[in-house]
């Protein structure tokens, strides 16, 4: 039986791009420690679904929700259409749609809205993965992989979109300032089929460390989303990246030297610094994750698809080469996939 293969990956960002120094001014931080979160982030700029001319930092819950909805639908549709075009698929070819977001909510959910906007067949099957955080694109990919594996002739589309700028919270907590310094808006889409021309996905693995359940996530005081982000995430996340890499390699009897490409979630500078050491790799293995962090920031679940797209655009894999894809998210969880060209 043919393994599901990646047929195409595409991304989309808001039109407005902001430098870190501009966002620091907008946030209004004037103390050395909070300024340092922006200045030492290794992020040059970020795309946000906000208008410079009309933005005001006291948006209501309703205004945040409306902005999330507009941004999620606009960016999700753009990424989806770009992935379909790159795969050479008509929208009628899509048998299964998996969507995900954690920075806002809609009912009907994101999948239903995209089915309407894209003009999918009325019998398209779908699933929406909600509230799963930065790792959820890989969770959605697992669902698409399962569908294509069960129905080898089918084609699936995965769409991850996050409007992190609709989940800011102005208070005195340091973790809020960290979130304001790194998170951004964007969408990614991936086409998956048995007859794809990209890498095959051989294995999926999930790892939970429930003792760290409270390390990262959202809470909703007054109905407004507020990030919870422990300083321990840099340690926990890097350790789980290494743990996931080992689990994926062990599944196929591989050694570190067998892995040519690393597609790692651009969680933040310190997570990547520590992951490099724990993975036992040189700096070149983190080229794509660092490039996405610098250019776009951390776009939560969509980020891993940006890293995958960057890798596919800048590398020339040959048949037989291996790759690892690892996402991180609240739970605390690592979600991974083993790729082979």
Image (spheres, rainbow, N blue to C red):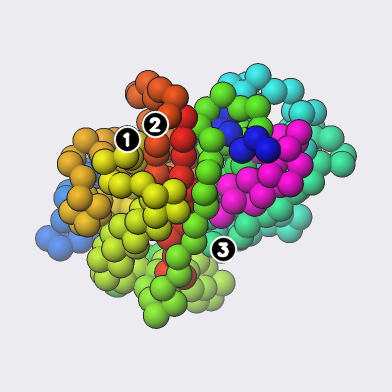
Residue 274 drawn in magenta:
no
Residue 219 pos. (x, y %): 48, 73
Q: Position of residue 198 (x, y in %)?
A: 52, 27
The disc placed on residue 260 is 1
* Label 1 element class: strand
Q: Which residue is mark 3?
A: 131
Sequence-earlier tag: 3 or 2: 3
Q: Are marks 2 and 1 in contact (CB under 8 Å)?
A: yes
Residue that sits furthest to the bottom in the current view = 211
| Comparing labels 3 and 1, the label whose residue is closer to the camera | 1
Instruction: Report the side of 268 relative to 100 (left or right).
Output: left
Separation (CA) of disc 3 from disc 1: 32 Å
The x and y percentages for residue 307 are: 39, 38
- Which mark is first along the chain, 1 or 3? 3
Q: Residue furthest front?
A: 253
User: Which residue is label 2 attached to?
Assistant: 321
Which dot, 3 or 2, sits closer to the camera?
A: 2
> Alpha-carbon distance for marks 2 and 1?
6 Å
Earlier sequence position, callout 2 versus callout 1? 1
Magenta stretch, residue numbers: 138-157
Mark 2 crowd level (few <14, some 14–19, many ≥20, 10 Å Cα):
some
Measured along the vertical axis of the image, is residue 54 above or below residue 321? below
User: Principal SS element in the magenta part?
Assistant: helix
């Amino acid at each position: 039986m043919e393994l599901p293969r990646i047929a195409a990956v595409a991304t989309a960002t808001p039109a407005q791009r902001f430098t870190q120094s501009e966002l620091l001014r907008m946030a209004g931080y004037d103390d050395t420690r909070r300024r340092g979160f922006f200045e030492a982030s290794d992020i040059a700029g970020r795309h946000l679904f906000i208008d410079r001319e009309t933005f005001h930092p006291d948006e209501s819950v309703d205004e945040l929700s409306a902005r999330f909805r507009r941004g999620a639908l606009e960016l999700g549709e753009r990424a989806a259409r770009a992935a379909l075009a790159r795969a050479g698929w008509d929208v009628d070819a899509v048998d299964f749609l998996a969507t995900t977001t954690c920075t806002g909510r809609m009912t009907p959910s994101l999948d239903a809205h995209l089915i309407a906007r894209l003009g999918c067949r009325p019998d398209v099957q779908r699933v929406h993965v909600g509230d799963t955080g930065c790792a959820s694109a890989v969770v959605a990919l697992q669902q698409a992989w399962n569908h294509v594996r069960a129905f080898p002739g089918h084609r699936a589309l995965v769409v991850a979109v996050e409007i992190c700028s609709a989940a800011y919270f102005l208070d005195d907590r340091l973790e809020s300032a960290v979130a304001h310094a790194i998170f951004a808006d964007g969408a990614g889409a991936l086409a998956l089929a048995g007859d794809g021309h990209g890498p095959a996905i051989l294995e999926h693995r999930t790892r939970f460390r429930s003792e760290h359940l409270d390390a990262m996530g959202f809470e909703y005081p007054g109905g407004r989303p507020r990030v919870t982000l422990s300083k321990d995430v840099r340690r926990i996340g890097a350790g789980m990246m290494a743990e996931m890499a080992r689990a994926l390699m062990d599944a196929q009897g591989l050694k570190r030297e067998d892995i040519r490409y690393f597609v790692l979630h651009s969680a933040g500078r310190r997570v990547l610094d520590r992951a490099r050491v724990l993975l036992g790799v040189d700096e070149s293995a983190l080229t794509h994750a660092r490039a996405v962090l610098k250019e776009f920031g951390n776009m939560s679940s969509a980020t891993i698809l940006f890293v995958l797209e960057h890798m596919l655009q800048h590398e020339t894999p040959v048949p037989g080469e291996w790759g690892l894809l690892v996402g991180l998210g609240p739970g605390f969880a690592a979600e991974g996939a083993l790729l082979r060209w």
